Image (spheres, helix red, strand yellow):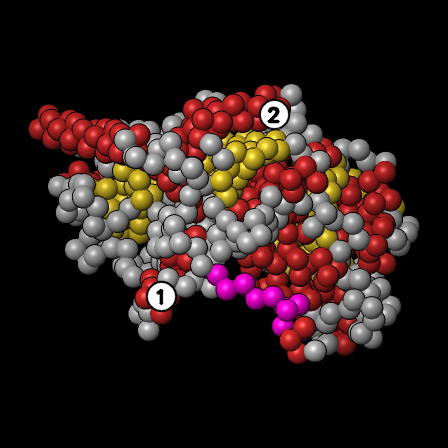
Amino acid sequence: MRELVMRYLNHDLSRRSFLKGMAAAGFTLGAAESVLRSLSPYVHAQDIPKQKVKLFEGTGGELLAEQLMASGVEYVFGNSGTGDSGFYEALVDRPQLKYIMVPHEGPLSAMAMGYAKASRKPSYLCVAGMVGMANFMGNLYNASKDQTPMVFCAYKRESSWSSGRDVHEEVFDQEILAEPFTQWRWVAKRSAMIPEMVRRAFKVAATPPFGPTYISYNSDLLLEHPIKAAIIDQSAFSVSAHVRPRQRDVERAAKMLVEAESPVLLVGDEIYKFEAFEKAVQLAELLALPVTTYRSCFENFPADHALFLGNFSAKMRYPGKIDVVLNVGNRLHEGGSRGGGIFPETIRLIDMRLDTRHLVDTYPAELAMVANPHEGLGDLIPAIQSSLTPALKAKIKERFENTKAFTTKLRESRIQTQLKNPRWNAVPILPQRLAYEVNQVLEKDAIVVNESGSTFSMRFDPVNGKDRIGNIGAHLGKGVGTAAGVKLAKPNNQVVLLVGDGSFVFGPQALWTMARYDIPVLAVIFNNYSYNGVKDRSIELGATAKGRMRDTGRVPHDWLGDPKMQLAKVAEGFGVKGEFVQDPKDIQLALKRGIDATRDGRPYVVEVAVARSGAFADNPWHQRISLAAERTKKV
């Protein structure tokens, strides 16, 4: 029966042939007609308002383009491939679909990822078959880790009539490669099924828990015509995410928080995704809850708020012994190579998330609530307000003042410590100094895209009031593309990219796209000529074995300074003006030139030589092997 249903949905069988097949399978006529009636909404969209449906006849490529428009797509992020010829034909007469080309699939997929993160809606990406798919797998992994709503498309290069013959560029079951990283996958077997495939892909990507989906088709399907199919507005397939917690759970959570001696609020990325930012601030201020975060992509709480402590740790100096943690929207996953627990057993955890897969995932919770954070916090706030007594209000006021005094002193101490650093004006430039200078030029509504371990030093001087878009997935090379995608989604906001040299060289090709389409991003490259973070972590781990790197100072895998990469010149090769800065006194002028360029609608790169930190910072070692010399010796 399953095969008959699929063939009917794929338009391989007529209504009569379907009934005959069901009868041959042993079904009565009445039972077969009942099944047929249940399939009618999927085939004819009879349950959808007429104004949301149109019957379209054209090529397979036109069906794809029409459904993309009906699904709300504005930008098609693509990399040229012969198998999409039918789609390119359709784009000629549909200027509503803006084709954004990047000369490599890695930064291309990063750009689509940045657009989806900033716009909070799925993006669409298409590449050239398996050869293109191989290049975007790293960012497919990133999108999966970050739970980013995206629709990835990689056509099957072989035609449908030659499939299975191991023809040029054919890889059997290529969709299986996407399985670990996607919410859903489908390969259309007939041209008429392409619109439905697209609708389902966008529906799944945009429905919590969010994440990438993968679609494909044999390349010849886009050229077939005439093909008829229903084009349906995506809104007819939207799924409401307004999930509220049970009232008794809300009341229990309120009681736990009100009675706690030292409660803490832990905020995660569902705060950003469901626009619960103001609710989180309101709850924190209501109880004077110290606020923390943990391995997040977004700025889920104002970094300059008096109650914000930064990253969560069970060993934080303040507030001391924590008794209750309310986690709202944070995916509590381990970090680092060694793992290690986030919460001690003494902490009572209230876990609130909409994504049930990672609710009470690793750590036991005294109370778990499935809820959209916007709705959950909206219900929790009045429940707490009704419990506030005069004595409790006095306690809350004291907690607020204590927390404010701690965070104010901490920030002032961090700034003063750095300003008094004897190397503050030294060459090479301290990454903290560069971060400080960048902060001075950020506009009020700036969005900071971060892909640099060195920029964690910005924590001594938070990006005050600014949005931040980072990542959890650790595949490198996403920074440049992500920043471009963010700017496309937020054209009226200043977008500044902070990227390390090691990350930058994994995906600079998106600079060409910035130049081609006038995407004005200011990119600041922290260049310490090394994989500095990898160096320190490797030495630490190596010390648990023989510790040879630690004992000798010889680290064979981190130094990028021989020869030195000239990244500003790389940018100019892609059509983006850039400059190289070595002296701290020149930073502000360089950044100002960059800001002026972006205000004129042009991207700009400022590459800064920054100091290494950690182990052997002043003693880079590498073993340079001359293969030419080796060959000469052998001769």
Name the residue tied to disc 2. 598
Q: Measured from the top left, where is residue 487 in percent x and y?
A: 60, 32
Nearest to N terminus: mark 2 or mark 1: 1
Name the residue tied to disc 1. 552
171, 506: nearer the viewer: 506
Give yes or no for contact between labels 2 and 1 (Cβ–Cβ under 8 Å).
no
Q: Amino acid at mark 1?
A: Thr
Question: In the picture provided, is 229 more to the left or to the right than 518?
Answer: right
Magenta residues? 622-631
Q: Which mark is residue 77?
A: none
- Residue 250 is at least partly visible in this image: no
- Give the CA separation, mark 2 to mark 1: 46 Å
What residue is at 79 percent from the left and 66 percent from the top?
A: 169
Q: Measured from the top left, where is residue 424 in percent x and y?
A: 35, 33
Q: Is residue 91 magenta?
A: no
For label 2, the SS is helix
Question: In the picture provided, is 264 more to the left or to the right than 462?
Answer: left
Quadrant into which the N terminus falls: bottom right
Q: Which residue is outermost to the left?
A: 391
